[in-house]
Image (tube, rainbow, N blue to C red):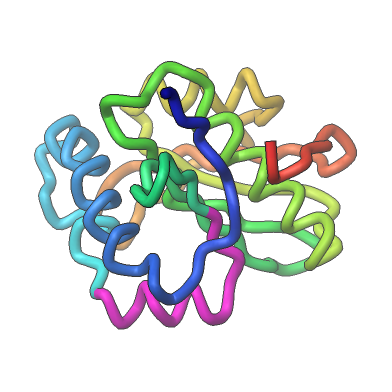
Amino acid sequence: MGMSVIISTASAQDAEQILKLQYLCFQSEAELYGNYRIEPLVQTLDSLRAEIATNLVFVARLGEEVVGSVRGAAGPEGTGQIGRLCVHPRLQGHGLGARLLNAAEAGLTDRCAATRFRLHTGHRSESNLRLYQRAGYAAVGNATGSDGVQMILLEKEAAAAAYVASA
């Protein structure tokens, strides 16, 4: 019997699974940049628990296993900030990243009245850039992360987002 991947709001009990998944998923990014001190790899469990308590955090579950995650937070001037999108390597390429991104957009629109979304990814992260461009994001600038990685900033207007998180 097969199982469906369900997207839902994360709870405090999900923190350890999210952190382990994040550590696994961002290894390829660290390798790509030759930098194993990137922010997702050095985040503490306590700081993740604080994010879950104060921001929107969604998880994708396959049974009891957390196989994907994304974070959203209210930013300045109606901008929803989206970050730390990750999908377990064995499930990548099946649309789960797009579903999580849509869940974050819908949550930020509904709960934070976001009128646009902003996210960033490393300049060498081609698969991430393709996902975000397919989802309607456009590059609006560059920045250097606190970990020294060159980032591309992307934005999208909220009017283009519509999603039901339970699908």
Residue 48 vs residue 145, the one in the foreground: 48
Q: Is residue 112 above or below residue 31?
A: below
**Image quarter (top left, top right, bottom left or bottom right) of the N terminus:** top left
Q: Residue at x 29, y 59 (%)?
A: 17
Q: Is residue 56 visible?
A: yes
Query: Magenta segment, which residues?
Result: 45-58
Q: Quadrant of residue 56?
A: bottom right
Q: Is residue 28 left or right of residue 87?
A: left
Q: Which residue of the protein is positioned furthest toward the front in this rendering?
A: 1
Residue 37: percent from the left, percent from the top?
14, 57
Q: Residue at x 70, y 57 (%)?
A: 80
Q: Is residue 100 above or below residue 64?
A: above
> Magenta region's main secondary structure?
helix
Q: Quadrant of residue 78?
A: bottom right
Residue 79: percent from the left, percent from the top?
74, 58
Q: Residue at x 45, y 45 (%)?
A: 61
Residue 54 vs residue 136, the one in the foreground: 54
Residue 21 vs residue 8, the one in the foreground: 8
Is residue 116 shown in magenta?
no
Residue 73: percent from the left, percent from the top?
62, 65
Numbered disc total: 0
Is residue 55 shown in magenta?
yes
Q: Which residue of the protein is positioned furthest toward the right in this rendering?
A: 159
Q: Is residue 147 visible?
A: no
Q: Is residue 148 above or below residue 48?
A: above
Q: Is residue 30 left or right of residue 89?
A: left
**Image quarter (top left, top right, bottom left or bottom right) of the C terminus:** top right
Q: Is residue 29 above or below residue 81?
A: above
Q: Residue at x 19, y 33 (%)?
A: 28
Residue 67 vs residue 152, the one in the foreground: 67
